[in-house]
Amino acid sequence: MNSFIIDINADVGEGIGNEASLMPLISSCNIACGGHAGDDSTMETVIGLAKSHGVKIGAHPSFPDKINFGRSVMDMSDVALYETLEEQVCRLIHHLDNANVSLHHVKPHGALYNLAAKDKNIAMVIVELLKRFAFPVYLYVPFKSVIADMAVKHHIPITYEAFADRNYNDDLSLVSRNEPNALIEDPGVMYDHLLRMIKEKKVRTVSGKEVSIEAHTFCVHGDNPKALRLLEGLRDRLMEKKVQIL
């Protein structure tokens, strides 16, 4: 039987306060850095927790919109968007430097993530941001997305990401959070969903189709009320299928 190595990531520092429980269950995290959530105190706290558990740390920048939690598209110039994303990521890096920890990756949040998957201008702003850093920083991106293609073209290292706790449409976009079936909240359903993506490289969409997908890191949203329940026991179940989380 083939063996697999994957990464499980979670969005953290978003005001939920469950990071101490999440960290032992994940292998990388995406820390909100002031755009949609987060402040200096939460960044310092979450960095300390991640460091103590050996969890890789990423920046989770967003449209600067705490009112809508970064889940609404903002009409911004490319320059203004670049400036706010740079400020957010550098703010996190400041705290990482103080903790003697390196930035592993960047993962855009919410509406920014979804828009960059299909909009060349938005994708290019994020790619230019990654080019700013002299050290290698991975960009977490969805499979077959505009931002993935542009990052590869500009020699930015990427990691394909898929979502363990979200349902997909046939075009590999995520089912809107406005729909009742957007989130996967049953641990057994999530396990089957995740294992299919890992072993078969396919996702079963809400229409029942099986669509090809590729990913190495899989997200469970930290703000999902059932995040802990979904993650608990997942590592053991995956190891039984020769899937390691590293």
Image (tube, rainbow, N blue to C red):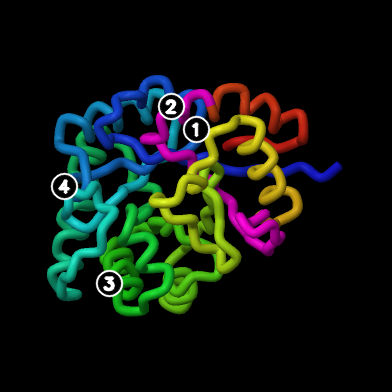
Asked if the residues shown at circle 1 and circle 2 are in contact, with their CB atoms under 8 angstroms apart, the answer is: yes
Residue 187, given in percent of the width and then of the height, sits at 60, 30
Q: Earlier in the sequence, mark 3 or mark 4?
A: 4
- Depth-wise, is mark 3 or mark 4 nearer the camera? 4
Task: State whether residue 200 is above or below residue 14.
Answer: below
Residue 207, given in percent of the width and then of the height, sits at 64, 59
Name the secondary structure under disc 2.
Answer: helix
Name the secondary structure under disc 3.
Answer: helix
* 171 with respect to 130 (left or right): right
Amino acid beneath label 1: Ile
Q: Which residue is mark 1?
A: 26
Q: Earlier in the sequence, mark 1 or mark 3?
A: 1
Between the C-alphas of marks 2 and 3, the distance is: 31 Å
The disc at residue 23 is: 2
Q: Residue furthest right?
A: 1
Closest to the observer, 206 or 91: 206
Q: Which residue is mark 4?
A: 67
**Would you call the spot at circle 1 few (<14 residues within 10 Å), some (14-19), or many (20 or more)?**
many
Residue 30 sits in quarter? top left
- Magenta part, dominant SS: loop
Amino acid beneath label 2: Met
Q: Is residue 216 magenta?
A: yes
Location of the N terminus by quadrant is: top right
Between the C-alphas of marks 1 and 4, the distance is: 28 Å
- Depth-wise, is mark 1 or mark 4 nearer the camera? 4
Q: Which residue is mark 3?
A: 125
Q: Earlier in the sequence, mark 2 or mark 3?
A: 2
The stretch in magenta equals: 204-229
